[in-house]
Image (cartoon, rainbow, N blue to C red):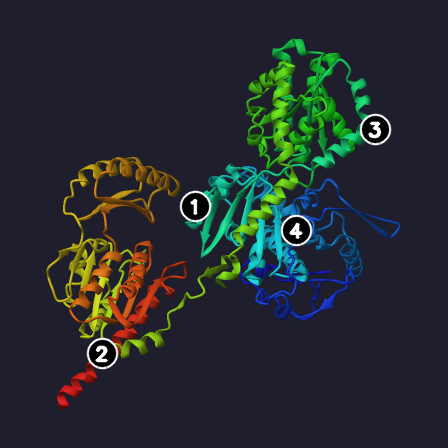
Amino acid sequence: MISRSYTNLLDLASGNFPVMGRERSRRLLPRVMTVPGNVSEFDDDDQASSDNPSSVSSDRMIIVANRLPLKAERLNGTWSFAWDQDSLYLQLKDGFPEDMEVLYVGSLSVDVVGSHEQEHVAQILLEKFKCVPAFFPPDLQSKFYHGFCKRQLWPLFHYMLPFSPANGGRFDRSMWEAYVAANKLFFQKVVEVINPDDDFVWIHDYHLMVLPTFLRRRFNRIRMGFFLHSPFPSSEVYRSLPVREEILKALLNSDLIGFHTFDYARHFLTCCSRMLGLEYQSKRGYIGLEYYGRTVGIKIMPVGIDMGRIQSVMRDSEKEGKVMELERRYEGKTVLLGIDDMDIFKGINLKLLAMEQMLKQHSTWRGKAVLVQIVNPARGKGIDIEKTRGEIEETCRRINEEFGYHQPIVYIDTPISITEINAYYHIAECVVVTAVRDGMNLTPYEYIVCRQGAKKSVLVASEFIGCSPSLSGAIRVNPWNVEATGEALNEALSMSDGEKRLRHEKHYRYVSTHDVAFWSRSFLQDLERICVDHFKKRCWGMGISFGFRVVALDPNFRKLSIPLIVSDYKRAKSRGILLDYDGTLIPQNSINKAPSQEVMNFLAALCEDKKNSVFIVSGRGRESLGEWFSPCRNIGIAAEHGYFLKWPGSEKWETCGQGTDFGWMQIVEPVMKQYTESTDGSSIEVKDSALVWQYRDADPGFGSLQAKEMLEHLESVLANEPVAVKSGHYIVEVKPQGVSKGYVSEKIFSSMAEEGKPVDFVLCIGDDRSDEDMFEAIGNAMSKNLLCGDALVFACTVGQKPSKAKYYLDDTMEVRSMLESLAEASEASNFSMRELDDAL
C-alpha cells in the first residue's frame, strides 16, 4: 500500500507542502472509544482542529517512535504480538499518572504485506495494545531507515564525516526525500488519533526530527516534546549537513527538546546561535530559546533503567541456575565484562587492545583475568559492520594465541538471553565500556543494579558516553589512549574491596533514584510547565516548507491597518510622530546608511503639516543625523538614544542627560580596545555621550563570550560612575545613566503639553530593544496626563515579535508605505487649506 506521503515526497523535500487535512476519506479514531478499535469517519478540519474545545478534560500521552514496543511474529498464517518488556518506550509509562492513557505510534520490526493484512494487524494492535502502526513500502523503508538514518544521520551524529563515498556515504537527496516522506507518514498516523487540545505528544530520536514541523503546521497549539537519544555533534560537524537548518527549525517547532547531557544540549544551542542567530536564556534553572514568541525549553536529563525489570530478570537467572553455572565456569578467574552492539563506534577493538596492554605490563594477571566480550547483533545495516566484525575476531584470535593456554579473551557473538546477560553482570568484577561515541549506554546502570547483592562494583567507562557524567565513581578513560586504558583496567582489578563498596554505594544511590520513571515524570512535568500559556496567546503559522514556524503573541497584538490609521490621522488636531531610524526607516543590513530620497520626500511632506511634530529618535550620533536630515528644517532629532535633542525648526542641540562629566570614557575605552584586539571582527564606535563595542562580524560564540566577560568587567570598574552598561544585539554599550528613548519621549510630550499643544494622535515606530522604552513611555504619558484624554496611540514595532507595542508592521517597506500614505493625507489637507486661503 503506497501512502500519499510517498507519492508526493519530491514535493515535500523540495519545500512544496501539500495542503493537509482536506481528504474526507481518512479513517480517524474518536477521542473516547466505548468499543476498542471502533473507527468512525469525520472530517479533519471539523474535528481535529486545535481551535475546537474538547469535551474530555483528562490528558493523554501519544508516544511516537520509529519502533513500537512490541514483539511480533507470524506462525502458520496467524499473527502473534506481545509487549517488549525491555523497550524503553514501554517502561517510561511508569512515570506517568496512573489515569493517563498512553497510545503508541510507530512501525513494526516485521513486514506486513498487503493493504488488507495491514488493516487487520492495525485493528488488532489498536484493540489489544493501543498501538497505531505505520506501514512503509519496502523501498521507502530502505531509503528512510537504512539510508538516511543509518548511513547519514547516525555517522554524522557520532562525529564521522563523509570524507569519501565509502566513509559514511555522501549526502543523497533521494534519501532525504524518503526521510521527509516517512516522517509525514508518522504524522498522518498521529492525526488519526490525536485530540490536540488534550493530548501530549512525545517524539523520540533522530528518526523523526522533522515530524514536529508537520504536527505544528497542522495544530498550532499542540503540546509536543522531543527527546534525542543519540549524541548531538558539535557545530563544526553538524553544519556539514546540507539540510542542517531544515532539521534545526523542525526541532524548534517542539515545545521541549531533551538531551542526555549538557554537552549535547550545548552543541545544539551553539548550532541555533551560529546558524539561526538564536540565543538561549537560563532562568531559575531552566534553559529556554525564544523563537517567534514561543519559548522552546531545553531539557537535560539522562535516561534511567527499569529497576523492577532488572531485578526480576536477576531473580529469574538465579532460579535457572545461570549464575551458578557461570561461577563454576570462571572459578578462580577475575572476570571483566564488555557488552556492546556490533557497531564501529563501540570501541570494542580498542578494549581488546587495552586488555592486551594490561597483560603485557602487569603479567601477574595472566591466567587470572579474563575479558568476556559479548557482542549483540547490529541494529541495522550500518557502515563497515562486516569489516569491524572481522577486525574484532582477528584481534581476539591474535591475543589468545599470544598468551597461549591462558586464553584471556572470551568472545561471544551469538545471541544470548537477557537472563544469561544478567548472570554475567552478577559474576563480573568490573564492566568495561570503551565506546568512542555513544548517546547514553545503559550497560553500566544495569551492571550496578545486578551487583547490589555483592554490594561492590567497579566501572571503567569511556568519557565519550552519555552516562559518564552521572557516574562520578567510575574510572573514566579516553579509549583512544590504549596504554592509559590498560592501566585503568589494572587499577580496577587491584582496587580494594572497601573502595569498591564505596563506589558501588554512590552509583547505586543515583541509579536507583534516577530510574526511567523519574526521567519520564520529569520530562512530562517540564512539558506541562512550558505549555501552560499555550491558550493565552494568539498563534498563527508562517513560512513554507521547513521554514514554517508558529508565531505566538499577545492577544491584543495586531497588524497596523493603514486605512484605519490614515482615517484617525486625518481627524487629529495635534500629532506627535516618533520614528526610529535603523531597522525602521532603512533596513538593518543596508550598506548605505543615509536616508534615500524616497524617505526624505515623505518626511518633508509630514513636517510641512503644521499639525505634526515629527522626531527621529535614534541611537546614532548627532553629527550624522544632523547632516542627513538638514534638508528637513522642521524635523526634530533625538540622537544617541535621546542624550542630545534638537527641536523642530531649531539648529541648536540641547543636552537631556543628567551629567556632562565624561571622565569615565578614559576608563572604558582602554578596556574596549583590549577586547577589540583579542576579538577578530569587533570594533568600537565612539559617540559624544557613549561608547559602543560591537561584534556583529566576529565569531558568534566567541563574540558572545567576550561580550559577557566585558559586561562583567565594565560593571565592576564603573560601579561608582554615573553610567549604565548594557548589552544589546551584538553590542555592549556604556552611556550616562537615565538616558533612554523613553526618557526623551516623555520630555517631548511634556514640552508640547506645557506649550498648550497636547497631542491627540501619537505614532511611535521602532524595531529593537531600545525602542521598547519608547513604547513604555507612551503608556506612562497617558497616565501622567501628558496627552489628551482621548488621544489615539499607535505604538508599532517592526516585525512580528513579542513587544510592548500593540501593533506591528512586517518590515521597513511596510513602514515606508504607511508613512507615505500619511504624507499623502497631509499634502491633500495642505492643498485644501491653501485653496481655502485663496478663496478668502
Position of residue 724 in the picture relative to residue 57 (left or right):
left
Position in image of residue 382 (x %, y %): 65, 40
Element carrying mark 1: strand
Q: Which residue is mark 4?
A: 63
Position in image of residue 741 (x %, y %): 25, 57
Label 2 or label 4, whichever comes before in sequence order? 4
Position of residue 830 in the picture relative to residue 298 (left or right):
left
Q: Amino acid at mark 3?
A: Lys
Q: Nearer the viewer, residue 425 or 236?
A: 425
Q: Which residue is mark 1?
A: 281
Please identify, in this view, whether the residue under mark 3 or under mark 4 is nearer the observer: 3
The vertical placement of 141 against 707, above or below, is: below
CA separation in Å, label 3 and label 2: 96 Å
Which residue in the rendered view is the most extreme toward the top?
Answer: 364
Q: Residue at x 65, y 65 (%)?
A: 55
Q: Which residue is mark 2?
A: 827
The vertical placement of 158 against 66, above or below, is: above
Position of residue 284 in the picture relative to residue 594 (left or right):
right
Position in image of residue 243 (x %, y %): 52, 50
Element carrying mark 3: helix
Q: Nearer the viewer, residue 409 or 467?
A: 467
